[in-house]
């Protein structure tokens, strides 16, 4: 069983912990958080980011358990910083998710309960595919994105870096969604979106 520490001890961290425990593949050592000192279940907040920086032997993996809606900047900063320090970020997949054997998922990404990732989908680094989201065949999601609960990304869509897609949003097949976009809850997207687009 592999050891892991979660960075972030807020509400999203509780969901991440639930997925991690259900996999039965990881032994959770605790959480890293600047502000919160309370335990989550029986898992302690070990300290802030300096706690990790002082550790020379990287005998455990990390997961960034901060969610994002407004901005992914903190997640990106943490991922890049600790990657440079040679920490490992395992892929975490709920056993309740449905993942094609022909899908590709990269480091630091978490797939939550009842999500679907279909044939030929490619999901990059440090992404959140949240509860019951659907990532259809041939979809490409780049890095640092959050595909929120029950969002539907239809076949052949490209989602560029750092984009948030809200709960229940639907993206029509074959579209290209630019970098740093915000697509609000329940949005229906029927045309390509340029970088930095906002739909509420």
Image (cartoon, rainbow, N blue to C red):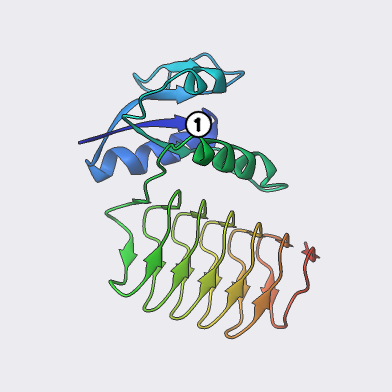
Q: Is residue 155 left or right of residue 175?
A: left
**What residue is shown at x 61% (from left), y 76% (from top)?**
171
Q: Position of residue 2 (x, y in %)?
A: 25, 36
| Above or below 118: residue 26 | above
As displayed, is residue 6 above or below residue 135?
A: above
Instruction: Kindly identify the residue that appears in the image at 37 percent across and 53 percent down.
Output: 113
User: Left or right: 157 with respect to 107?
Assistant: right
Q: Position of residue 162 (x, y in %)?
A: 66, 57
Q: Where does the N terminus fall, quadrant-wise?
A: top left
- Asked if residue 167 can be seen in this view, the reply is yes
Report if residue 48 is visible in the image: no
The residue at 36%/29% (across/down) is 58
Residue drawn at x 71%, y 64% as measured from the top left: 179
Q: In this rendering, is residue 142 above or below 48?
A: below
> Which residue, given by chain and number where applicable, does mark 1 sit on?
7
Which structural element holds mark 1?
strand
């Amino acid at each position: 069983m592999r050891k892991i520490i979660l960075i972030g001890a807020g509400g999203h961290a509780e969901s991440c912990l639930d997925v991690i425990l259900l996999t039965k593949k990881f032994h959770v050592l605790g959480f890293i958080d600047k502000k919160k000192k309370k335990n989550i279940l029986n898992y302690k907040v070990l300290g802030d980011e300096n706690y990790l920086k002082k550790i020379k032997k990287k005998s455990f993996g990390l997961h960034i358990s901060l969610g994002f809606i407004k901005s992914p900047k903190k997640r990106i900063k943490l991922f890049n910083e600790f990657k440079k320090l040679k920490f490992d970020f395992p892929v975490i997949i709920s056993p309740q998710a449905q993942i094609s054997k022909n899908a590709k998922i990269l480091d630091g990404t978490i797939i939550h309960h009842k999500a679907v990732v279909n044939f030929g989908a490619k999901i990059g680094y440090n992404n959140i595919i949240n509860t019951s989201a659907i990532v259809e065949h041939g979809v490409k999601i780049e890095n640092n994105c959050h595909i929120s609960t029950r969002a539907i990304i239809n076949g052949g869509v490209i989602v560029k870096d750092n984009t948030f897609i809200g709960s229940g949003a639907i993206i029509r097949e074959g579209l290209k969604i630019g970098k740093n976009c915000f697509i609000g809850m329940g949005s229906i997207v029927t045309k390509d979106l340029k970088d930095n687009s906002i739909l509420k």
